[in-house]
């Protein structure tokens, strides 16, 4: 299974979807194999926000809901586009720690970020693209 977390999900402010509704959208896996959406929200520490409208959440909370949505299908591979772009420093660090735990649990985690120092202690492999060229670096060579 594949889980995808976009940088953002555009929903009109008037749209009535709750955090739980958005999380449940990730349930496209085989019947019975999916993680319950409330459990996925608990993993990202947003279970108490399940009934809040998605459009009213902070940017960091929205990112965590989108991560929860990807976890519902119990993915082997999680792709993330700037997962901490809307999060404050504390929330971003917590998100990266959670991604590290998911990787330790067996999921492959691939993410795009402009903040290499944030993933320096967590990444096992880093591919940097600069000026159209691909450079592979070891995590220990990244700035902290």
Image (tube, grey):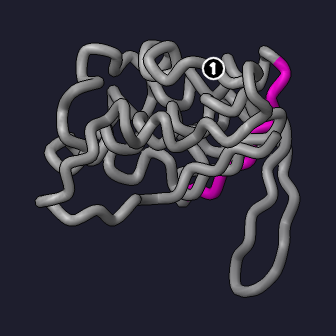
Is the residue 126 above or below the residue 109 in the image?
below
Q: Residues within 10 Å of mark 1 (few under 14, many from 20)?
A: some
Q: Nearer the viewer, residue 1 or 34?
A: 34
According to the image, label 1 marks what residue? 35
Residue located at (63% from left, 57% from top): 112
Q: Is residue 139 visible?
A: no
Residue located at (34% from left, 21% from top): 46
- Residue 60 is situated, as x and y percent measured from the top left of the image, at 31, 40
Residue located at (75% from left, 63% from top): 128
Overall secondary structure of the magenta section: strand
What SS does tag 1 mark?
Answer: loop
Can residue 136 be found in the magenta stretch?
Answer: no
Q: Nearer the viewer, residue 128 or 44?
A: 44
Q: Where is the N terminus found, in terms of image quarters?
A: top right
- Residue 27 is situated, as x and y percent measured from the top left of the image, at 61, 36
Q: Quadrant of residue 133?
A: bottom right
Q: In screen coordinates, is 126 left or right of 17? A: right
Is the residue 70 above or below the residue 34 in the image?
below
Q: In screen coordinates, is 70 left or right of 133? A: left
Point out the residue furthest to the front here.
31
- Residue 104 is situated, as x and y percent measured from the top left of the image, at 78, 17
Is the residue 49 above or below the residue 142 in the image?
above
Q: In screen coordinates, is 13 left or right of 31? A: left
Is the residue 113 above or below the residue 83 in the image?
below
Q: Which residues are magenta?
A: 106-113
Q: Nearer the viewer, residue 81 or 13?
A: 13
Q: Is residue 64 visible?
A: yes
In this rendering, the count of numbered labels is 1
Q: Nearer the viewer, residue 21 or 40?
A: 21
- Residue 59 is situated, as x and y percent measured from the top left of the image, at 27, 47
Q: Where is the C terminus found, in terms of image quarters?
A: top right
């Amino acid at each position: 299974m594949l889980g995808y977390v976009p940088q953002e999900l555009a929903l009109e402010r008037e749209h009535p979807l709750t955090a739980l509704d958005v999380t449940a959208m990730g349930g496209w896996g085989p019947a019975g194999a999916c993680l319950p959406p409330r459990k996925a929200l608990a993993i990202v520490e947003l279970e108490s926000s399940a009934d809040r409208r998605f459009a009213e959440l902070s940017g960091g909370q929205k990112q965590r809901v989108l991560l929860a949505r990807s976890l519902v299908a119990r993915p082997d591979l999680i792709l993330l586009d700037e997962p901490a772009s809307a999060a404050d420093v504390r929330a971003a660090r917590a998100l990266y720690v959670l991604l590290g735990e998911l990787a330790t649990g067996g999921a492959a985690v691939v993410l795009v970020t402009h903040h290499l120092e944030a993933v320096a202690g967590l990444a096992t492999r880093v591919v940097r693209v600069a000026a159209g060229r691909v450079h592979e670096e070891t995590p220990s060579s990244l700035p902290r």
